Image (cartoon, coloured by chain):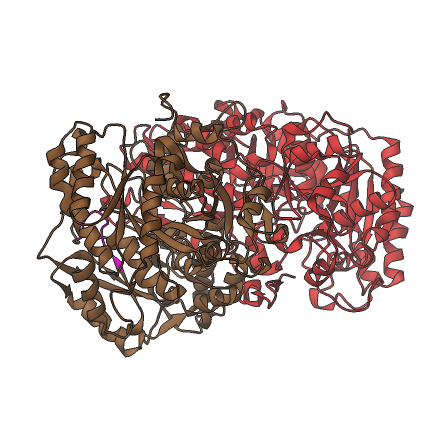
Chain colours: A brown, B red
Amino acid sequence: MKTTTPLTDLEIASRAKMKPIGEVAATAGIPEEALEPYGRFKGKIQVDKLPPAVADGKVVLVTAISPTPAGEGKSTVTVGLADAFSLLGEKTMVALREPSLGPVMGMKGGAAGGGYSQVLPMEDINLHFTGDIHAITTANNALSALIDNHLHQGNELGIDPRRITWKRVLDMNDRALRHVTVGLGGPSGGIPREDGFDITVASEIMAVFCLAKSLDDLKERLARIVIGYTYGKEPVTVRDLGAEGALTLLLKEAFKPNLVQTIGGTPALIHGGPFANIAHGCNSLAATLTAKRLADIVVTEAGFGSDLGAEKFMDIKARQGDFKPDAVVLVATVRALKMHGGVPKTDLSAPDTLAVAEGLPNLAKHIDTIRSFGIEPVVALNRFITDIDEELETVLGYCRENGVRAAVADVWAQGGAGGTDVARLVLEQIGKGNRFAPVYDELDAFEDKVAAIVTKVYGGEGVHFTDRAQKQLADIRKRGWDILPVCMAKTQYSFTDDPSVLGRPEGFKITIRELIPKLGAGFIVCLTGDIMTMPGLPKEPAAMRMDVGREGQAVGLM
Amino acid sequence: MKTTTPLTDLEIASRAKMKPIGEVAATAGIPEEALEPYGRFKGKIQVDKLPPAVADGKVVLVTAISPTPAGEGKSTVTVGLADAFSLLGEKTMVALREPSLGPVMGMKGGAAGGGYSQVLPMEDINLHFTGDIHAITTANNALSALIDNHLHQGNELGIDPRRITWKRVLDMNDRALRHVTVGLGGPSGGIPREDGFDITVASEIMAVFCLAKSLDDLKERLARIVIGYTYGKEPVTVRDLGAEGALTLLLKEAFKPNLVQTIGGTPALIHGGPFANIAHGCNSLAATLTAKRLADIVVTEAGFGSDLGAEKFMDIKARQGDFKPDAVVLVATVRALKMHGGVPKTDLSAPDTLAVAEGLPNLAKHIDTIRSFGIEPVVALNRFITDIDEELETVLGYCRENGVRAAVADVWAQGGAGGTDVARLVLEQIGKGNRFAPVYDELDAFEDKVAAIVTKVYGGEGVHFTDRAQKQLADIRKRGWDILPVCMAKTQYSFTDDPSVLGRPEGFKITIRELIPKLGAGFIVCLTGDIMTMPGLPKEPAAMRMDVGREGQAVGLM
């Protein structure tokens, strides 16, 4: 342990010494003319002003076992691991998602790693940052305003107000906006209809933003977005409305990747942040590809466990981005394994080696899942203060017996120095190469694609499509949209579609209750169970603890 | 005319050569440690890192005759006049409002001056800029989410959902959001109630932001905002909800004034932009006071005509900010005077000296209005290509006869060089001093304060309070809120409360139909007629012409 004082993440972050952003850029090989500073410690990168690629960085994806309320510290490990690679002399960059303000104001109070493995300036990253998410909110809602204006001004396209699928968004946890009626108040208020607000990170524009390869690609994807259907049940796109130019203009500055630094001084790109349930849960392709051309090692993460974020990283992001992951780090914690072993949340601090052992099947299934993509994972056992050696050894021993490289990561307390054991194992694994392949082919029948995910990735037995989903699938097939990849919207807490089933369930089926074509993002969302696209605030929101201190500093970001 | 090619504002702006923002800061006397760059040509100023004041700048307020659809070019004159002072060797800064995206996407396509009198980078200023308005949107809607969450979590304060006056906002023209119902969809969606969205520039947080003297003052003002009433009809404030800390945290970076430059290279502060009808219509006090301590001449503008923006500048902003305006420039155009003289919008390009003469009473009343504040105005006759000499001379001759300094401003075509005649007259006028005083005393009876505005500023005969307004006034008086200044919400097109009455109406009364206490902003809004707080989009929104060009440049901002 580096320190015995119980500093908060915000205190650690504000005591850390930051390099000016120009220096960070220089370390990363970004010339001055390609850097647009945003304050002293943030910048945007003009990718078209970068020199030709000096590297073809190895992509290290960080994923995790099934998340529990105990917390896995995946972002913390991602940041610490990047600093560990830097310490080992590797030219490294880390690529992360931008935090949404909704959870920051709601539950978490901050999301940029933790302890001595954070990205800086933590306070700015958590609050508005360079405004990218606000630009996405604006583009999303400009489209909504144009749709409602189209209805009001005569509805030339014959859009059926009952079949508008495009929702408004705010970067906020606000349950009262989930279901609303708009257009009230008489003729001057437009056409009344049902609508709803999602959180911005659930917007298709966020997914589009994170999968576009260039501004041209961004515009083309925006044009393809389906916003609803006509009275004749034909799809209406952004192109039909003629709005793709304005939306691209609203997004063009945001589309430049953001450069910051870790506490250890590793250059970090933080850009885009789609939900990992309704969307694909990875930072922007623009950031990942930029990092690949600048650094030898690119550490990045995907949302939730390997069944969600990592599956989508492999089957959607890597496929659309035409690159392959070189290594996968699977984060596990003793605390989370105890929960998978049946221990209630309140008792996680008490040593319980048996429960850890009983939770191991969850880890085992995640190892198998990653192997189903042709990659051997490296397990990073993220240490918590309450862990005892016997518990840690139970996990490491299991990995040894099963031929999986594994080491303890003590990055929260030690920063990069606590991650070098894992980093060395990752370098070994990269040296061995892999036989990466997505778990399905895009040309497979749609049901077969879903089945491949359920059986190989989740370990289930099969798929059930509800009558509604079957009807939707017939329509999707008729329009030729079934050649798109699948984006599963499933609970993150279980391999099944029931969040209460922990551990390693077997013999289950997944029910697909609805299909949502996202033609801009380029995937078909399969909804299983109730997926929340607009969170609510808890009884005591994190916002209640927030303030500005006497010297203008942030207070209450955790 | 500098050029005969009909370049658009965007073309002129993109051909202009900008100085790096560090150079602009140096010109303005802002040391490097007080400048936070935002890209290469924008910056935020850390006011607490500025050296002690080197100046006590003279404040030149630019206002206008009653606006017409013909356009008066008040921002263009403001910018051109600032460049003219710079050309005359005066150390000058200009302070302006930030453009709202709503009108940019709707009607105007851009709002940062015009021709060769623009602020740069025009494209960024019109699109997101440094994110201030997004921060205000976020703070406003975070408060809404906290209110609805309070209702949902047990409503300890006993807030009556029917009496919540705090509305949500978006920086968008979106008529379908004027009247909405929220909280639908069953218990998980919160408590159903009526709500509505205003455009962000109409939010009380925007007014608070623009009147606060410091971060502490900002927080104290936010705490005072009344969000609605309990079942017992007692006011509920942000302080009661405990949200002022979080809201201040969300606003603290935005609160730093933004530095940019004019085409002529004059340093410009663009910061805050409240509506001039529902609020006070001036850029932030923080920006004005910052400019005053750095420059000898501070040129600034207030929204709409002298009856709206200028009245509020004098009676609200200058009073709360404890400074006085040193000169007032009154912008008039031949085209607008023709409309006041009865010519329809379609015929304004045809010469019509008689109509100009018939429109002069409108100018005359604005001259009287400014004199009612103890200041002699200088008239700037903003030249348009279609104006003929005889028309211009009609206006100048009238001014001469009435002892008013007046000159033609040809700043659209010539930049600062076209504004030096006006600038010289302003310097003369400043040399003479003035006897500035607000038109009412805060301690006057509330009705007398309103009457002073109506009779002295509008030239009307008296005020009628509806029964509803009288009841509200009784309540306001009971709570002691009647000592606050008045913020009139009136049509900008007429001195009366009827937008169709142009020229110089006489013998009219103003009807006050509703009073809205804005305790954070520190004024009581008096609503007269229908005041639009959420605009709609036209049949062909400006957004339809917007795009990104081949080299990533903006297309379609006018």
The answer to whether residue A540 is above or below residue A267 is above
| Left or right side of A357 for A552 | right
Front-most of residues B521 and A356? A356
Q: Kindly report the secondary structure that dominates the magenta region of the rendered protein.
A: loop
**The furthest residue to the left:** A507
Which range is magenta? Answer: A488-495
- Residue B106 placement: quadrant: bottom right
Front-most of residues A123 and B373? A123
Image location (x, y in percent) of residue B23: 74, 43
| Left or right side of A241 for B25 | right
Answer yes or no: is residue B147 visible: no
Image location (x, y in percent) of residue B521: 55, 32
| Left or right side of A50 for B151 | left
Name the quarter where the N terminus of chain A is drawn. top left
Which residue is at 23% across, 46% downward? Answer: A65
Residue A138 is covered by the magenta coloring: no
Image location (x, y in percent) of residue A464: 14, 64
Name the quarter where the C terminus of chain A is drawn. top left
Image location (x, y in percent) of residue A426: 33, 49
The answer to whether residue A463 is above or below residue B33 is below
Residue A494 is covered by the magenta coloring: yes
Front-most of residues A115 and B501? A115
Answer yes or no: is residue B12 visible: yes
| Left or right side of A368 for B323 | right
Which residue is at 35% across, 39% downward? Answer: A419
